Image: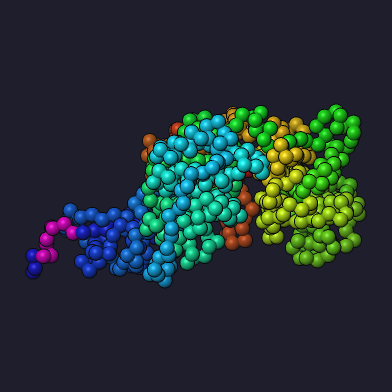
Amino acid sequence: MSAALFSTAPRPIARVAVDMSLPHLDRPFDYLVPEKLAEVAQPGVRVRVRFAGQLRDGFILELGEETDGLRSLAPLERVLSPEPVLKPEVARLLRAVADHYAGTFSDVMRLAVPPRHAATEKAEPPELPAPALDPLPGSPFDHYPTGPEFLAALGRGQSPRASWQVVPSHSDAGDWARGLAAAAHATLSSGRGALLIVPHARDLVRLRETCAEMFGEASFVTLSADDGPAARYRAYLAVSRGHVKLVLGTRAAAYAPVHDLGLVALWDDGDDLHSEPRAPYPHAREVLALRAQQAKCATLFAAYHRTCEIELLLERRWLHPLALDARVQRRLAPAVRLAGDSDWALERDPLAQAVRMPRQVFEVIRVGLAAGPVLVQVPRAGYLVVLVCAECREPVRCPHCHGPVRAGSARVSCDWCTRPVTGWRCPVCDHTRWRAPVIGAERTAEELGQAFPGTKVIQSQGDRVVDRIDDAPALVVATPGAEPEADTGYAAAVLLDAEILLTRADLRASEEAHRRWINAVGLVRGGAEGGTVIAVGPTDAVALQALVRGDPGGFASRELADRAAAQVAPAQKMATIEGPLPALAEITDELTNHDSGGLLPETERPRDLEVFGPVELPRPASADEPVGRLTLRTPLDQAGLLTTALSDAVSVRSAKKLPGALRVRVDPVAVS
C-alpha cells in the first residue's frame, strides 16, 4: 500500500461559508483545495461544494493548512468565479450583524453581496474618472457652530462621530444632500472612501444629482435594488476592485466593500425603509454603527428629527451633537403654529378645535397660494377611508360577505367582494345613515378644489407619487412620505388629522408622527422667506408642542426618558419571537427554567430576562395550529447574553428538527 495514504504533511484547506440558513450549521466548514484550483481558490471567491450529499454555493473566508493529515476532507468541487467579491472586512461585518440580530451569516450574506452576473463580470470595466475635489465655496455646515470643525477633522483623516440635527427648511442650512456630499468631499480629500446611505429611491436621486454637480458624472456609483441585476453588480464590482471610493445607496449598500473606508453617513434613520424586511431584519443604522466601530471610521447620522436610538448614542457620548440652538433653528425654519392654540384664535373661530379644517387653515392656504405652492399632508390615502353608523358608531359591514366598506368618489362598495352597498341598516341601532370619521387624501383634494376654484390641485399618494413640482401656485395633497419637492420650496404647509398619527397602537407612534410632520416642514421655505406651517390636532400633544418649539432634541430626550421609565426599547434590549404556540412554550421553558437541566448553561442566560406572552395572533390561512408572539426584555448590559441565548435556543431546535418555524426579531422596529 502506498505510503502517501498515511502522509501527515499539511494540506491546503479553505474555510467556506456555505450558503444555507440552518442555525445549527452557522459556521465555516473546511474543504480541501485541489491542486488544479490552488491558483483561483482565494479568500472572497464564490465556490461550489458538496454538503450533506448536495452541491451548494458558498464563499471562501480564509485559507489555511491542515495540521491533522488523517482527517478526511471533501474537496472543493469548483470555483464559480475568480472574482473576490467578499472582502475580509465585510465578512467580519456580516458576522457581527448576524450575532447582533441572532441570525445566521448566510442570511446576512445574501443581503450584502448581490448575485453574480457573469456577463458583467467578464466585460471590460467602464472608465470611471476620479472625483473632482476642487475647494468648496461653502456648505450647509457653515451655518452650524461645530460644522466647519467636523469637515476639517474629516479632511485631516480623523474619524469624528456626529449626529447632525438638520434645520427643517428648504434653505441652504437645511440642504441635507449637499451636507452629506460636503462630508464625503472632505473625506475623499484625505484619501479615504465614503459611504452615503438614504432610505428611498427619491432621496437617492436627489443625492446623486448633488454629487454629480460636486464631483462630476461617473465619479461615484450607486447601489440600489431598483438598478437591476447587471447595473447593480457592475457598480458592486467597481467598488470591490477599488475603482471608486464614493458609494451612494439604500440599505443594502451599507455592506459595500469600500476601500480605505473613512466615512459612513445615513440620512433619516427613523424611516422604516432602513429596516430590512428579510431575516435577520437588520437596520441600516445599526449596521453602519457596527461597521464604524470595526473600521474605526467617521460617522454622520443626519435627520430633521431625532430618534430615541440616536438620543441614546448621544447620551452615551458615542455620538456628538452637530446642531443649532433651538432659538436659532426657529428663526431659520418656517414658522409652525397649531390651529386654535390661543384664546384669541378661539374667539375668532370657536370651532377651531372641533372641525377638521378650521378658518385658520383656509387663511394659511389663501396667503400661501399668493406666493407659490401649498402642501397639505393627510395621514390616509383614499376617499372616505372608514364608514361608521352616524348614531352608534358601529362599523359599516357588507351585507353580503361582512367585509369592510369604503366610499370612493363615485360609489360605496365592499373591499372584499367589490359589490355596491345599498339599503344599509345598522344591525345594532337600526339607523340608516352613516358617516366617515376618517377622510382620505382624495376626498380632501376634492373639498379643497371646491373651496379654491381655479386652483390647480395635485395629488400624490400610494402608487401615484409625484416626485417634483414647479413654483406655480398649486394645492398639493399628499400622504406622509409621498410629498413632492417644490423647486424653491413650498410657501406654506398644512398638517391635517394629526390625532390619527398620534393614536396609532404602536410604541413609536409619537416619534413617528413627529418625524413625518417635521419632514413635511423641511419642504417649506425658511422663516426669512415667509414660510409658514399650521397643524390641526390636539394642542396639548407633546409631539405637536415640540414641532412648534422647533426642538426635536428635547422631544427625543423626553421620549427616551419615558421609555426608560416604562422599561422598553431602546432603553432596554427587546426581542420578539413569532411562531406556533407549542414552539413558543418550548422556547420560553428553555430560556427561563433554570432548574430544568436544559441545553443552555445558566451562565449563558440573561439574569434579568423578562418574558411577556405568548400572545395569540390571527392565524394565517396556511397555519395548521395557533400562532403567537413572545416578547423578551432585558437590561442593555445583558443584550449580548440575550442574542446569544436566542441563537443557541433556535440552533438546538434546528438540530433536533423540531416542528414549528420561528421568526426572531431583535430590536423590532414596531412594538405594539
The picture places residue 135, in percent across and down from the top left corner, at 48, 44
Q: Which picture quadrant has residue 160?
A: top left
Report the quarter where the N terminus lies. Answer: bottom left
The picture places residue 215, in percent across and down from the top left corner, at 49, 52
- Is-magenta flag for residue 9? yes
Q: Residue at x 24, y 64 (%)?
A: 39
Q: Is residue 53 above or below residue 189?
A: below
- Is-magenta flag for residue 22? no
Asked if residue 167 can be seen in this view, the reply is yes
Q: Which picture quadrant has residue 298?
A: top left
Q: Is residue 552 above or below residue 180?
A: above
Q: Name the residue furthest bottom.
A: 119
In this rendering, would 359 be left or right of 658? right
Using the image as rendered, state which of residue 484 and residue 621 is in the foreground. 484
Protein image colouring: rainbow
The picture places residue 547, in percent across and down from the top left corner, at 69, 35
Using the image as rendered, state which of residue 422 and residue 325 is in the foreground. 325
In this rendering, would 495 be left or right of 72? right
Using the image as rendered, state which of residue 539 and residue 11 is in the foreground. 539
Q: Residue at x 53, y 35 (%)?
A: 147
Q: Residue at x 68, y 45 (%)?
A: 523
Q: Residue at x 73, y 46 (%)?
A: 490
Report the quarter where the C terminus lies. Answer: top right
The picture places residue 232, in percent across and down from the top left corner, at 48, 62
Total marks placed:
0
In this rendering, would 79 be left or right of 319? left
In this rendering, would 348 be left or right of 370? right
Using the image as rendered, state which of residue 590 and residue 494 is in the foreground. 494
The magenta segment: 4-11
Asked if residue 278 can be seen in this view, the reply is no
Q: Which picture quadrant has residue 125?
A: bottom left
